[in-house]
Amino acid sequence: MELKKRRIILGVTGSIAIHKSVDLASQLVKHGASVHVVMTENATRLVQPLQFQVISRNPVMLNLFNAESDWKPAHIDLADQADLLVIAPATANVIGKMANGIADDVLSTVAISVHCPVLIAPAMEDHMYQNPFVQANMTRLRDHDVEFVEPVIGDLASGRQGIGRLNTVEVILERITRRLSRKIDLIDKKVVVTAGPTREYLDPVRYISNRSSGKMGYAVAEAAYRRGAEVVLISGPTAVPPPTGIDCRYVETAMEMHEAVLAVFDQADIVIMTAAVADYRPETVSSHKIKKKADQFTFPLVKNPDIALELGRRKSRQILVGFAAETDDILSHARQKLADKNLDLIVANNILEKGAGFEGDTNVVTLLNRDGSHEQLPLLSKREIAEIIFDRAATK
Ligand code: PMT
């Protein structure tokens, strides 16, 4: 466990799942962490602060106006020294405040004062969790590198069944460990990532494309950058803002993506191909807008180069990771692509599954290795999946 002597702020809010937080505090202490609990007023109505104080062996912070032991306000001191802020359970209220920079109590003030990673484990009723404003707040926080331990489906405080139950202490603990052991292991490595769709033009107005938003690929590029790599992101047209610190090269067509990837391939150490490249393009591209005439209109398509296949043939020391967007026989189709394209790892997603595939901030993937083994991951944010891909790619 990577928790020895790590300073963890455990934020606790007024949710009925608070008993798991007591257990979490206890587990963290057992694993050697220095735990500092910050409770909202509502949390203190459900559990006595003394319980957290005894378990954590540290004073519990309940408001901003405790007698200061030093010249520095205690919440700033705590925030400055923290290795991680975990909020478990987190209500919709604290999530909303954090997403909007509101600091009107001790926990929300600590949350905007920290400069360490933040992990949030929500717990709330299903309707609250699915509320579009709550989801938008979570997306906003994810965009700023806040991680979520997604709630699970189960019995809720209302007596209903649904999504919103706080995840288990084991899962939260595992995620804390993973977050704290995030590696800077790609220093001196060059990582090339393809992302987004391609557009295959028929004329200056129309094109064939697909639903890829680029989110998966951008998350991968950002993860590589965070881990210290020099990153080239070769992106089809997307609405995702260019990530800072990354060499972004924009293309439109599969042919342009092919050329851009080959231009950097020889210097690359790891290539991750998340792009949804069109397999075919119109045989001819009209230089003028095609006019409406006959009742039916057909046009021939020709095959695009398969970039991954070509890299698989050329590769020397490079680690090649492909993606497979599938709708049926996921594992066997992905396995076939892994072999045909000579990849080191393939990340398969069932694009028909809820929370998986195109456009969203989450994905559900299976990682398939060359030795025939595979690893099914639960629903995770695309950012979290990106981290796991590098954890696995690093061992290839
Ligand atoms: O962009 P998002 O909205 O976040 O969505 C993410 C995603 C669904 C696009 C992503 O998770 C994904 O599955 N990407 C691969 C999509 C795909 O087109 O897979 P494929 O099975 O057609 O291709 C297999 C692999 O070969 C892929 O790595 C692909 O980049 C590559 N390929 C495919 C065709 C081609 N001509 N050249 C290629 O390099």
Image (cartoon, rainbow, N blue to C red):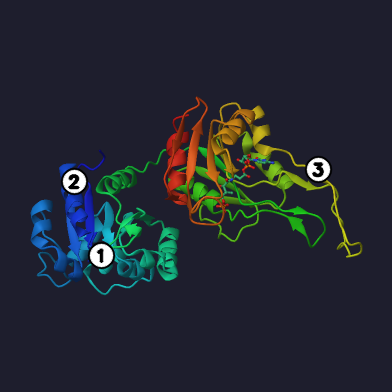
Q: Secondary structure at mark 1?
A: helix
Residue 62 seen in this snapshot: no
Tag 2: amino acid = Gln
Give left or right: position of 80 versus 98. left
Which residue in the protein does label 3 denote?
302
Tag 3: amino acid = Val
Asked if disc 2 is less than 8 Å from ligand 1, the answer is no
Q: Secondary structure at mark 3?
A: strand
Residue at x 89%, y 62% (from the top left corner)? 295
User: Could you tell me residue 325's position as x and y percent?
Assistant: 59, 44
Question: Are the residues tagged 3 and 2 within 8 Å (C-beta)?
Answer: no
Residue at x 26%, y 57% (from the top left corner)? 88
Residue at x 33%, y 73% (from the top left corner)? 102
Give left or right: position of 188 versus 312. left
Tag 1: amino acid = Val
Instruction: Decide which of tag 1 and tag 3 comes sooner along the chain.
Output: 1
Q: Quadrant of the N terminus?
A: top left
Instruction: Decide which of tag 1 and tag 2 comes sooner along the chain.
Output: 2
Residue 77 seen in this snapshot: yes
